[in-house]
């Protein structure tokens, strides 16, 4: 086992953190890559459901309606509309269900809230359970148990005299 | 395969079931009952849902201004819904390959003939994802003499929010979409028309 | 002839399941071991019935016997032979035949494996449960899902053939059987869980004994899901392999709970804890397979993978309710008595890690289930219709996936009971460097985006940890260091790591565009050149195929096409994919070129590392086989992990056992 001087122990980890930090910096800064208009159309299309298909998005489906919608999105992108404006148009024409991302508010917004609540509850439950395990032993020794043990020891003592 | 022997946990049926067991709590039972209730609600939900194919799509366009409907017809002329401003119009999305469209077509013919004399309602058809020659054959077979917009009609369908065929929309004389039909019958069209005329107080002479 | 044979098979299977269940029930209640031993005979009859109807239907399909309604609805004289064979499971009724046959096989396997213990009530109850499940599925075949209805074909009748999407790729022959082997396989541990609850004998290793059955079923399910994903990718033409579609989610849910079980059962074996939790997981896994059946066949949720809706929904939901009532009832009744009085000493221990693993997988399953059925909930609540699609699932499950990767890295080096920071630092140093190296490599190769880089780093970290375990085991035990539960598990982890890397890369760096090209024209996109060279038309027996010839970076020509099937108006796209270890370039023909010299519209999708998804799946399958390999029998109370510094080394002093 190597000597446990703090520097020796932590140096490799510190170096690792530095290297990772540098990489993430490069990753964050360089990430505004050249996104063509096509890419923007695709990313919007991925959030819009194909109205005549069984659950595919407009980006994926090959139905005629999807192709029309993709062309329409491309036109709107070219005309300078923002993503939210385009999505709003489709929501107005086809209803809320054409957007593949559920809304943030109302009853439907619960779908975002419930998992977070469940996670918090689960984490809290784990904390409670671990604390209970640490504080209270699972079985309690009763007087009856003590008597039983004393009896058994006495019997053993009687049978086998200790050297 | 067997473990070292555990403490005996074969339950003695002579024990009373309501005595709290070793752990001292009814946690498992309570959690199980709670989960059971949740699942009961869940099952009830699943059991009472209509099948996806039975659901009709919502019609957001109803109550709003009619989108632009224009294009080239079968006969080669340019037509636009604006030409019929001042009259009621029925915009009928159909396709020659669609069986329910074939079934509803005679009803449209009947309806158009009934109103031809009065001239108060104009039917305009829009071919949805269809081939002009197939559409021509369809009309040759089935009759109907109203303008049929063919060609690249995707934009029009998109603006109406069409999700399948047949779909028909009743448009008031001042350009408001009043009703949506998924498959028409002449009688239904007439009754909705009468009700809408009564409501808006608009009727054409 | 086929009709009669098929109906006879169904009747035989049904009767055998019914009488088997009744006999076992009587034998268990009246404590007659001789009756329990009859289980073997009944299980043979159930399987025989299943095989007879399987053979009858296949014969009808291959000979295009249109007097059978199922063949009239789904077969065709123009369908190639392989696809006719696979049409057995291509539509709803036939898929139930496959399920019932596989179930018969599993029941027989259980009676054979446990043939020396058939008189044991625990095995008896398990087999009883399995006979009841078989009764349900054979009952479906007599009732709502009858495939052997007769039909009088008019002269010159030819069937429409299977759905065109089901006849253009050979994976059709493999994905469903693998998936069903997985689904049905979970019946076995479920049956034993019920038996354990009924008899109260949870602590005798029965759940641990069925661990290998669960592992095998899980392995089949994994392969089935990966194959399904691959098939979607090859056939549906949008370069996607996972769409969080309700049917896909239906297959994923039992996989998630099954994975949780495979881990927590080790805590039970080692510490005797989590017994009731494991029982619940097994029951939930089986219930989820039935729920999945419901979602796929009832039409309640839209899906491109669903069977056409039919009247089978109520029957399945009824069976699901029965399972829920029985399971919850048994757990509520017995559960508190069966809880072990143990405790987990420290969260930083392998037990703690497995507990965290279970919480995460349970949470994952909860989110997937919630998202899948949420549209139904909202509709029932206020009539509105919303969609919960890919953006939701990705956003919610990504963090869980990341934490799971982290756990995968740390857990294998955690000892049981308690770990010290020093120990962890020492053991995790090399894997952490491998993780860092992965990030550096990715950045050098041009990958950007913090989320993706974190994913790569964590995947490398987990992979490094798994490789460390395998290396140590190999060094210690030679070739035996690669087989057995722990080592096979590390190989499976490696497969998961490969899939995670491929998933992160292909999702983060996908590029997609559409081009309308004249003949001879070239387009450049994302570093690749595409040249539209020409097109060709081919007439098959049952379809007309128009293909565009496209060269990618000078290779090819690749032939994305459109198939128009003779019976019906459906035009199906056939994508063409150029696969290399670095990326996949997928081409889809969007619009038919109208005549010679006309332009073609082609969609290009470029995704990196797709091939590694399938390779990762294969690694997982190999790992499962390695893990199922019988290892050296070990006394469960022998110490296995490194001794905790300071504690006396018990291996030196003999310890009396028993």
Image: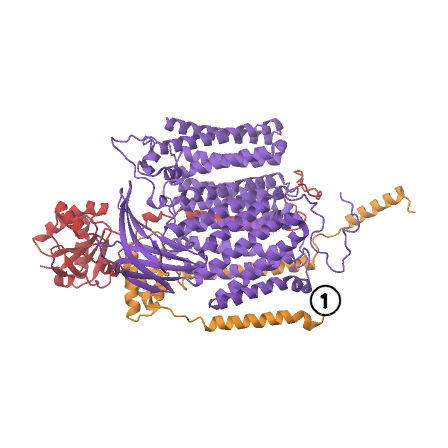
Chain colours: A orange, B red, C purple
Number of numbered discs: 1
Chain of the residue under label 1: A
Tell me: C118 left or right of A46. right
Task: Return the residue nearer the eye: C88 or C379.
Answer: C88
Residue B8 in sight in this render:
yes
Q: Residue at x 60, y 55 (%)?
A: C355
Considering only vertical position in the picture, is C374 above or below C219? below
Tell me: A133 left or right of B177. right
Instruction: Assign the N terminus of chain C to one quadrant of the image.
Output: top left
Give the residue at mark 1.
A2
Tell me: C405 left or right of C578. right
Considering only vertical position in the picture, is B141 above or below C437? above
Considering only vertical position in the picture, is C484 above or below C71? below
Q: Residue at x 77, y 54 (%)?
A: C649
Task: Return the residue nearer the eye: A18 or C342.
Answer: A18
Instruction: Assign the C terminus of chain C to one quadrant of the image.
Output: top right
Task: Return the residue nearer the eye: C412 or C534.
Answer: C534
Q: Position of residue C34 (x, y in %)?
A: 61, 26
Which of the 4 quarters of the picture holds residue C84?
Answer: top left
Residue that lies at the very extreme toward the right in this rendered image: A163
Q: Position of residue B192 (x, y in %)?
A: 19, 53
């Amino acid at each position: 086992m190597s000597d446990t001087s703090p520097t020796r122990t932590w140096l490799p980890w510190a170096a690792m953190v530095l290297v990772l930090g540098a990489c993430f910096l490069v990753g964050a800064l360089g990430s505004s890559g050249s996104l063509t208009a096509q890419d923007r159309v695709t990313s919007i299309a991925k959030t819009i459901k194909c109205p005549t298909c069984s659950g595919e998005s407009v980006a994926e489906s090959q139905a005629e309606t999807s192709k029309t919608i993709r062309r329409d999105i491309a036109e709107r992108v070219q005309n300078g509309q923002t993503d939210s404006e385009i999505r709003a148009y489709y929501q107005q024409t086809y209803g809320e269900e054409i957007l593949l991302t559920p809304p943030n508010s109302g009853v439907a917004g619960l779908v975002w809230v419930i998992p977070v609540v469940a996670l918090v509850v689960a984490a809290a439950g784990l904390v409670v359970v671990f604390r209970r395990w640490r504080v209270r032993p699972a079985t309690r020794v009763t007087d009856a148990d003590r008597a039983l043990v004393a009896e058994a020891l006495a019997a053993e003592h009687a049978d086998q005299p200790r050297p | 395969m067997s473990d070292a022997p555990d403490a005996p946990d074969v339950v003695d049926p002579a024990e009373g079931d309501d005595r709290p067991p070793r752990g001292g709590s009814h946690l498992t039972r309570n959690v199980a009952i709670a989960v059971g209730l949740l699942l009961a609600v869940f099952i009830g939900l699943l059991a009472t849902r209509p099948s996806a194919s039975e659901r009709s799509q919502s019609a957001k366009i109803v109550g709003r201004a009619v989108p632009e409907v224009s294009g080239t017809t079968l006969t080669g002329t340019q037509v636009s819904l604006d030409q019929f401003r001042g009259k009621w119009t029925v915009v009928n999305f159909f396709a020659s390959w669609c069986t329910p469209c074939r079934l509803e077509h005679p009803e449209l013919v009947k309806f158009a003939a009934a109103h031809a004399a009065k001239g108060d309602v104009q039917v305009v058809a829009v071919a949805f994802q269809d081939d002009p020659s197939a559409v021509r054959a369809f009309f040759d077979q089935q009759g109907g003499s109203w303008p049929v917009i063919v060609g690249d009609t995707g934009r029009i369908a998109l603006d109406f929010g069409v999700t399948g065929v047949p779909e028909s929309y009743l448009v008031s004389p001042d350009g408001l979409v009043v009703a949506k039909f998924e498959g028409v019958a002449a009688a239904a069209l007439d009754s909705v028309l009468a009700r809408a005329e009564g409501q808006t107080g608009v009727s054409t002479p | 002839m086929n009709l009669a044979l098929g109906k006879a098979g169904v009747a035989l299977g049904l009767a055998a399941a019914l009488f088997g269940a009744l006999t076992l029930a009587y034998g268990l209640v009246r404590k007659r071991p001789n009756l329990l031993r009859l289980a073997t005979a009944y299980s043979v009859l159930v399987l025989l019935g299943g095989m007879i109807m399987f053979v009858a239907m296949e014969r009808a399909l291959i000979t295009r016997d249109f007097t059978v309604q199922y063949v009239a609805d789904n077969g065709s004289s123009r369908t190639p032979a392989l696809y006719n064979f696979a049409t057995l499971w291509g539509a709803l009724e036939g898929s139930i035949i496959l399920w019932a046959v596989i179930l018969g096989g599993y029941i027989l396997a259980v009676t054979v494996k446990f043939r020396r213990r058939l008189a044991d009530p625990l095995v008896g109850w398990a087999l009883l449960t399995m006979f009841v499940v078989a009764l349900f599925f054979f009952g479906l075949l007599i009732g709502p899902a009858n495939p052997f209805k007769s039909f009088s074909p008019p002269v010159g009748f030819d069937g429409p053939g299977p759905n065109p999407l089901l006849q253009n790729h050979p994976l059709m022959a493999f994905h469903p059987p693998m998936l069903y082997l997985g689904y049905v396989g979970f019946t076995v541990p479920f049956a034993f869980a019920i038996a354990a609850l009924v008899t109260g004998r949870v602590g005798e290793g029965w759940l641990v004994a069925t661990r290998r059955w669960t592992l095998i079923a899980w392995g089949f399910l994994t392969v089935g899901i990966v194959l399904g994903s691959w098939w979607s990718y090859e056939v549906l033409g949008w370069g996607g392999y996972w769409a969080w579609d309700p049917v896909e989610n239906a297959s994923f849910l039992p996989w998630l709970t099954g994975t949780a079980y495979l881990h927590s059962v080790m805590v039970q074996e080692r510490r005797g804890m989590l017994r009731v939790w494991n029982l619940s997981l097994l029951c939930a896994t089986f219930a989820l397979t039935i729920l999945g059946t419901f979602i796929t066949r009832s039409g309640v949720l839209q899906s491109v993978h669903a069977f056409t809706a039919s009247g089978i929904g109520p029957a399945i939901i009824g069976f699901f309710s029965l399972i829920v009532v029985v399971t919850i009832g048994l757990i509520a009744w017995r559960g508190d008595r069966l809880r072990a009085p143990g405790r987990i000493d420290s969260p930083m221990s392998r037990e703690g890690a497995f507990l965290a693993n279970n919480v995460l997988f349970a949470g994952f399953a909860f989110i997937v289930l919630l998202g899948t059925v949420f549209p139904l909930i909202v509709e029932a609540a206020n009539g509105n219709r919303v969609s919960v699609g890919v953006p939701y699932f990705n956003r919610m499950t990504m963090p869980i996936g990341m934490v799971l990767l982290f756990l995968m890295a740390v857990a294998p080096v955690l000892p049981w009971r308690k770990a010290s920071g020093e120990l962890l630092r020492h053991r995790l140093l090399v894997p952490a460097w491998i993780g860092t190296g992965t990030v550096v490599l990715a950045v050098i190769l041009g990958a950007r985006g913090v989320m993706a880089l974190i994913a790569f780093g964590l995947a490398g970290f987990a992979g490094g940890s798994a490789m460390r375990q395998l290396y140590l085991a190999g060094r210690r035990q030679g070739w035996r260091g690669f087989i057995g539960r722990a080592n096979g598990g590390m190989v499976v982890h490696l497969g998961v790591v490969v899939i995670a890397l491929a998933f992160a890369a292909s999702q983060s760096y996908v590029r997609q565009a559409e081009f309308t090209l004249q003949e001879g024209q070239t387009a450049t996109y994302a570093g690749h050149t595409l040249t539209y060279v020409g097109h060709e038309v081919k007439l098959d027996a049952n379809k007309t195929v128009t293909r565009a010839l496209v060269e990618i970076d000078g290779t090819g020509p690749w032939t994305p096409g459109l198939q128009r099937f003779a019976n019906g108006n459906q035009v199906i796209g056939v994508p063409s994919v150029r696969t290399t270890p670095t990326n996949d370039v997928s081409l889809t023909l969007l619009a038919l070129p109208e005549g010679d010299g006309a332009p073609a519209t082609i969609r290009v999708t470029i995704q990196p590392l797709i091939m590694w998804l399938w390779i990762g799946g294969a690694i997982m399958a190999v790992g499962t086989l390695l893990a199922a390999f019988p290892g050296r029998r070990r006394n469960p109370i022998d110490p296995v992990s490194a001794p905790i510094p300071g504690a006396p080394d018990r291996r030196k002093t003999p310890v009396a056992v028993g």
